[in-house]
Image (tube, grey):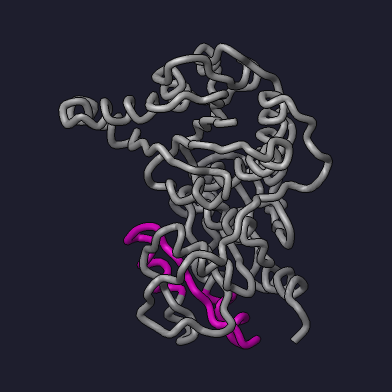
């Protein structure tokens, strides 16, 4: 059986889809997937052994410059790639407007969520076959349930299995020798309200180093690299990483002893790798989109207004929109939780 998956973004959401593919592969041993995905995250689908091909979009760029995308042939190339092969089933696992547009471009029938379950309700118009799932469960479980309905198998009642082997990826070239024992501190996030204070990260670095660990601090852009450098400046055993591919980050994460994360895509990579990890939450709901899997622990703000899902903190005590709730989660609290997950030395 050959199946086309349409799920474009984001990094964490793509990782949440992997267990649904594992379920399907266990139920239908000969199944193969192609996957339509944003080019920024195109490494992720290929982590799964049943994914054979990715079709890359650049919808953010195309949306900003649609005429140039058409004139330079990018849209035509994408359309031809999308319709190059026949599939037994085409599934939109994202079910929002941008994925529905891709579904509409695909010739033939597409399966997706119904109007009551879509992230953005008009998306359901793109699907000939529509399904309902329980929206009050984690994103991973929603996609597992949807995949089982569409492909007609009974989902096994067992924990989600990402089904990947990250050890096969090579480490990146670094400007320092990779320490034998290190932790990943994922300090960055796309929302201001998801950021833990820089001073808390610096204190946590010193906790880790005192216990014999070095610390690696990844980034996704220049501003995040500068923030990583500021955090690393408190200790010579902390290292700010330049921006690397997701395959390289997967190799590093898989070899780390543990991780502490903001609510961002690389936090879910720690879950895929299965390493002990603590993720700090304020603005978002861990029950629906939190890191999920073995050794994954959450520290959640106890503010009454959390989760608020606001990108800037509206409280009077907030400094330029920075999250007040995150300042209340201390480095000592995070370290104590992380230390409880580590093997005895």
Quadrant hosting residue 131: top right
Image quarter where the C terminus lies is: bottom right
Instruction: Report the residue that reaches farthest toward the right.
Output: 157
The answer to whether residue 289 is left or right of residue 47 is right
Residue shown at 45% from the left, 87% from the top: 236
Where does the image place residue 257, in percent across and percent down from the top left? 63, 75
Q: Looking at the picture, how far across and down is residue 77, in whole percent?
A: 27, 30
For the point 63% across and 15% down, which residue is it? Answer: 130
Does the rendering let one see residue 317? no
Chief secondary structure of the magenta portion = helix
Q: Looking at the rendering, which quadrant does residue 63 occupy?
A: top left
Q: Say whether residue 215 is left or right of residue 157.
A: left
Q: Residue at x 42, y 24 (%)?
A: 102
188 or 270, which lies in front? 270
Residue 205 highlighted magenta (yes or no): yes
Q: Is residue 204 above or below residue 6?
A: below
Depicted 287 relative to depicted 187: above or below: above
42 shown above or below 246: above
Instruction: Work out whether residue 238 or residue 32 is closer to the camera in this orientation and state it.
Output: 32
Q: Residue at x 51, y 67 (%)?
A: 251
- How many discs mark residues in the rendered view? 0
Image spot of residue 47 (x, y percent): 53, 52
Is residue 266 inside the magenta stretch?
no
Determine if residue 171 is in view: yes
Viewer-nearest residue: 79 or 144: 79
Query: Which quadrant, please, contains the N terminus?
Result: top right
x and y percentages locating residue 183 in the rendered image? 58, 74
Please state the extent of the stretch shown in magenta in the rendering. Answer: 202-231
> Which of the 4 image quadrants contains residue 27?
top right
Image vertical order of residue 345 relative to residue 31, above or below: below
């Amino acid at each position: 059986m050959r199946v086309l998956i349409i799920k474009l973004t984001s990094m964490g959401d793509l990782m949440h889809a992997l267990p649904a593919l594992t379920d399907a592969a266990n139920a239908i041993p000969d199944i193969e997937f192609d996957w339509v995905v944003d080019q920024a995250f195109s490494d992720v689908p290929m982590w799964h052994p049943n994914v054979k091909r990715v079709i890359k979009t650049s919808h953010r760029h195309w949306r900003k410059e649609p005429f140039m995308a058409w004139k330079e042939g990018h849209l035509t190339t994408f359309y031809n790639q999308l319709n190059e092969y026949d599939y037994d089933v085409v599934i939109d696992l994202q079910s929002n407007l941008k994925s529905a547009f891709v579904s509409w471009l695909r010739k033939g029938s597409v399966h997706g969520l119904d109007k009551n379950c879509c992230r953005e309700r008009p998306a359901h118009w793109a699907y000939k076959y529509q399904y309902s799932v329980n929206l009050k469960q984690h994103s991973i479980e929603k996609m597992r349930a949807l995949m089982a309905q569409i492909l007609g198998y009974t989902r096994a009642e067992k924990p989600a299995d990402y089904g990947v082997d990250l050890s096969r990826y090579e480490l990146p070239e670094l400007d320092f020798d990779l320490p034998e024992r290190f932790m990943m501190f994922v300090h960055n996030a796309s929302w201001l309200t998801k950021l833990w204070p820089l001073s808390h990260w610096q204190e946590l670095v010193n906790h880790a180093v005192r216990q014999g660990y070095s610390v690696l601090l990844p980034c996704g852009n220049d501003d995040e690299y500068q923030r990583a450098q500021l955090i690393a400046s408190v200790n010579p055993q902390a290292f700010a990483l330049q921006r690397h591919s997701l395959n390289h980050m997967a190799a590093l994460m898989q070899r780390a002893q543990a991780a502490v994360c903001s609510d961002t895509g690389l936090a879910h990579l720690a879950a895929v790798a299965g390493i002990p990890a603590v993720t700090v939450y304020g603005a978002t709901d861990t029950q629906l989109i939190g890191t999920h899997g073995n050794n994954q622990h959450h520290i959640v703000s106890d503010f009454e207004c959390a989760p608020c899902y606001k990108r800037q903190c509206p409280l009077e005590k907030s400094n330029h929109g920075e999250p007040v709730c995150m300042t209340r989660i201390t480095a000592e609290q995070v370290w104590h939780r992380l230390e409880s997950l580590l093997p005895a030395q």
